Amino acid sequence: MKRLLLAAAATFALAGLSTADTAPAAPKTNLLANVKAGEPMRMVYELDARAMILIIPATGRASFDVELKPNTYTIKSKVRTTGLADVFVNYNMELASSGFVRAKELKTSGYVSQNRDGKKNRRVELSMKKDGFTMTANPRFGDLGDPAATQEQAILANDPLTALITFALEPRAKGADPCGGPIRVFDGKQLTYLHLENKGTANVKSPAWSGQAIECHVTMDKIAGYKAGEVNKDTLTGIDGPLRMYLAPLENGSHVPVRIVADTDRIGKVTLQARTLRFEPLQTASAQAGAGGAP
């Protein structure tokens, strides 16, 4: 799950960073509230990863296709990495999640993860309801951690895809910390809380977005589902210092990570940068039928 979060989120070479005393202007709209009000939306989001192993470049990419309807959502994702030791491994993952749209958040109902790493090629299927969850894994996990996540703990979290996207889309209240959080993540086995600390603003340039971004430092709280002795460690394995995440405060009320930077203890700096980020109206079957029947 750790590697998925890096490749995704919360799965970039820094240029011209400078801090500022003032935060970006507060957004005027709430994307999720607009979706609930009957404006379906698609979000297309891609992240590229770059690192150097000695003199050999290593790369990765995570793509997300998010469909938001007034009551439900779906997220489809592909994550491919090459040679990013410890932080990333060589694997090819396909993931999907679905659930319910609320005015201020998304909530998981189902999650499927298929990893084709050439070793275990594990498939995980997670189903979440108000009172608990069920999970199947093939091949099965050797154990579910010490301690294992409880039903009560898990249902307060979201799957990794939903956790990342709802973190980006959920509205920040006026005067609230724009970094938001904590991000509560459950992948069927590991339960993790990511805590974010606001470090001001920085100028960020990426292929998908450029401007004054919000700088957040991320630390990890391993709640359950890990090996004995790992619970409550507040660091990301293989990361030297905090993970640095830069959020683009968009006019639609979302705060999307457009750059993520980690200093690793094995291969130096790893940077993720937003390659694609766009929002577009989603044409639903009912909307198309209505348009076809119009005079």
Image: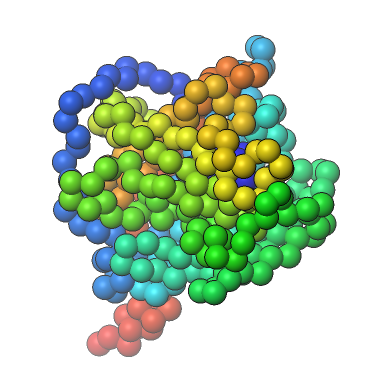
Residue 123: percent from left, percent from top: 74, 57
Coloring applied to the structure = rainbow
Q: Residue furthest top?
A: 55
Image quarter hosting the N terminus: top right
> Would residue 260 be visible to someone looking at this image?
no
Vertically, is 83 above or below 192? above
Residue 242: percent from left, percent from top: 47, 27
The residue depicted at 39 percent of the width and 81 percent of the height is: 286
Q: Is residue 113 left or right of residue 193?
A: right
> Would residue 228 be visible to someone looking at this image?
yes
The residue depicted at 31 percent of the width and 29 percent of the height is: 199
Residue 10: percent from left, percent from top: 47, 43
Question: Toward the viewer: 165 or 140?
Answer: 140
The residue depicted at 65 percent of the width and 12 percent of the height is: 55
Residue 102: percent from left, percent from top: 36, 68
Image quarter hosting the C terminus: bottom left
Q: How many marks?
A: 0
| Residue 31 quadrant | bottom left
The residue depicted at 76 percent of the width and 43 percent of the height is: 117
Q: Is residue 250 left or right of residue 6?
A: left
